[in-house]
Image: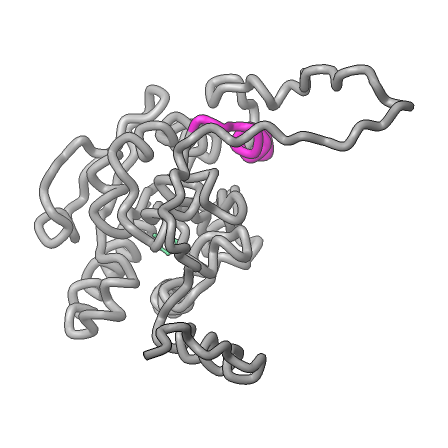
Amino acid sequence: MNATPTPLTPQQAAEALRWLSEMGADEIVCETPANRLAPPAAKILPRDPERSAPPSPDTSPAQSRTAADCAGLADIEAALAAFDACPLKKTATRLCYADGNPAARVLLVGEAPGRDEDIEGRPFVGKSGQLLDRMLAAIGLDRTTEDRERAVFITNTVFWRPPGNRTPTEAETQMCLPFLLRTIELQKPDVIVCLGATPAQRLTGRSDGILKLRGKWLSASVGGRTIPLLPTLHPAYLLRQPTNKRLAWRDLLSLRERLDAH
Ligand code: URA
């Protein structure tokens, strides 16, 4: 018996790829496992006799900038772009920092960028982002408006997509936490809304699950300020459990009430 598979025609290969994509495959996995945590292999460049001097080290200010050094949100984005300590950066396509209006009263914090966010470099642009936009619109909020009263600013607990959309590890969120805290300090929201357990736990120090935390007004202490914080259900969870949208709706009404009262 001949075990060698018959090679696919280009048309069959395209068809197979389309089928895999429709089934939800979004990564190419090779037969040999890749160690994504290993340091990158040194690149051997072809010699250019006219440029024989070794390249000078990168001394741009962003290279060594810590979160505390950042004076504005654009600085944080630049510092993250130069931040190589988080292993998620190695597997992600691009940095996904924040979206919306930095002057907004409401800061939304999600868990981690997914596939669409990894491609676009903006949080919550995929299916769960579209649901989030509809939820926000239902209480008069909008990430695209310049009106501070109706605006939101959106970020995540980590700024690169975890492989296969897994939950970020404690180490990964801890590594990104100084940048999230500095974002909160500089953006100065009136309220923080946490989408899902990961941001709620990181910012409040609690370890309860989201079904216990949601709908309760808690607080985050950041940069000497105590900021009211409302955990609610993540829109991706609501897409899987639509009957729980009624719980999220209660949380949204509570947010609306708070914004109207203060
Ligand atoms: N889910 C998140 O938590 N964040 C995003 O940006 C997208 C999906």
Give how far across and how far down residue 83 sits, in percent: 51, 28
Instruction: Using the image, determine if residue 56 lies above or below residue 247.
Output: above
Q: Which residues are magenta?
A: 74-85
Residue at the spot 24% in from the left edge and 43% down from the top edge: 198
Q: Quadrant of residue 234?
A: bottom left
| Camera-nearest residue between 192 and 99 | 99
How many badges with numbers are in the image? Answer: 0
Which quarter holds ligand 1?
bottom left
| Quadrant housing the C terminus | top left
| Camera-nearest residue between 224 and 110 | 110
| Camera-nearest residue between 191 and 109 | 109
Is 63 included in the stretch rendered in magenta? no
Residue at the spot 55% in from the left edge and 82% down from the top edge: 9
Is 75 included in the stretch rendered in magenta? yes
Residue at the spot 49% in from the left edge and 46% down from the top edge: 96
Instruction: Using the image, determine if residue 41 lies above or below residue 155.
Output: above
Magenta region, main secondary structure: helix
Tell whether 175 sits left or right of 169: right
Judged from this view, the residue extending furthest toward the front is: 1
Give how far across and how far down residue 107 sits, in percent: 39, 45
Give how far across and how far down residue 237 sits, in percent: 23, 63
